Image: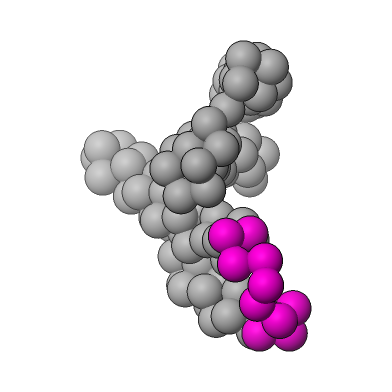
């Protein structure tokens, strides 16, 4: 199986998670913004997330099982969120956050075992 078949879903999941992290958490930097405006902007950002997530899962299903795709997506989400939290929100993760995320990564790894 060509490497691109395995890599493309991962790259698409990475891109989709960047959009989704901004949609879900980006507004925390603008707490005074009206909630309705935040919801509408978040929906707009989420549209682009879906434009990457759906093809990632469609293409990835030829190489990975649905549970593997979900496990991969969770680990990517945590990595994107860790960077986003520190860089954008100015809230670096503490040891217990990293420990919790590591346990989730172990769970995702277990999904890939035969």
| 37 falls in the magenta region | yes
Q: How far across and how far down the image is residue 90, in percent?
A: 50, 42
Residue beneath the point at 48% across and 38% down: 86
Residue beneath the point at 46% across and 49% down: 88
Q: Is residue 78 visible?
A: yes
| 43 falls in the magenta region | no
What is the quadrant of the C terminus in the image? top right
Residue beneath the point at 36% across and 40% down: 6
Residue beneath the point at 67% across and 66% down: 31
Q: How far across and how far down the image is residue 81, in percent?
A: 54, 42
Query: Looking at this rendering, what residue extends furthest in the right direction?
Result: 35
| Range covered by the magenta-colored residues | 27-38
Q: How far across and how far down the image is residue 69, in percent?
A: 57, 43
Front-lying residue, 14 or 69: 14
Query: Looking at this rendering, what residue extends furthest in the front direction?
Result: 32
Q: Is residue 55 visible?
A: no
What is the quadrant of the N terminus in the image? top left
Indicate the quadrant where residue 29 lies: bottom right
Front-lying residue, 114 or 35: 35
Q: Classify residue 52 as left or right of residue 102.
A: left
Indicate the quadrant where residue 25 lies: bottom right
The scheme the figure's colours follow is one colour
Q: Is residue 12 above or below residue 85?
A: below
Q: Is residue 114 above or below residue 62?
A: above
Q: Classify residue 38 as left or right of residue 88.
A: right
Q: How far across and how far down the image is residue 11, in percent?
A: 35, 49
């Amino acid at each position: 199986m060509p490497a691109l078949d395995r890599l493309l879903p991962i790259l698409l999941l990475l891109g989709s998670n960047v959009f989704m992290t901004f949609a879900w958490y980006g507004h925390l930097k603008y707490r005074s913004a009206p909630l309705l405006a935040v919801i509408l902007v978040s929906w707009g950002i989420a549209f682009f997330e879906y434009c990457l997530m759906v093809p990632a899962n469609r293409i990835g299903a030829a190489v990975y099982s649905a549970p593997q795709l979900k496990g991969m997506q969770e680990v990517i989400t945590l990595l994107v969120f860790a960077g986003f939290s520190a860089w954008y929100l100015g809230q670096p993760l503490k040891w217990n956050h990293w420990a919790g995320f590591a346990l989730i990564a172990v769970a995702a790894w277990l999904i890939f075992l035969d």
